[in-house]
Amino acid sequence: MTTEMIKMLASAGAIAIGGLAPALAIGFIGSKAMEAIGRNPEAAGKIFTPMLLGMAFAEAIAIYSLVVVFIL
């Protein structure tokens, strides 16, 4: 294996894991938030902001992995 091939495989692995894990986390956060709102609709305002924050932090991880791929 050449070094270029190893770099390409490392980049592919980083973006695959770095994109899949945050996608699953965002789906889980949204699912649980909708479940909580369904159980208690009056708390929708209190649930919505932390839900968006959690999704933004999970998305930031995906952006970090994209930056790592560009550096590699």
Image (cartoon, grey):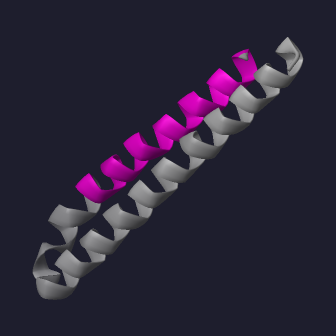
Q: Nearer the viewer, residue 7 or 31?
A: 7
How far from the left and from the top, in percent, is residue 49? 27, 56
Q: Nearer the viewer, residue 59 or 48?
A: 59
- Which quarter of the figure is the N terminus placed in? top right
Q: Residue reaching furthest front?
A: 1
Q: Quadrant of residue 8?
A: top right
The residue at 73%/37% (across/down) is: 12
How far from the left and from the top, in percent, is residue 41? 16, 84
Which segment is the magenta one? 50-71
How far from the left and from the top, in percent, is residue 39? 13, 86
Q: Quadrant of residue 58?
A: top left
Q: Nearer the viewer, residue 56 or 43?
A: 56
How many discs mark residues in the rendered view?
0
The residue at 45%/59% (across/down) is: 24
Q: Main secondary structure of the magenta part?
A: helix
The residue at 39%/52% (across/down) is: 55
- Which quarter of the figure is the C terminus placed in? top right
- Is 60 in the magenta? yes
Q: Quadrant of residue 40?
A: bottom left
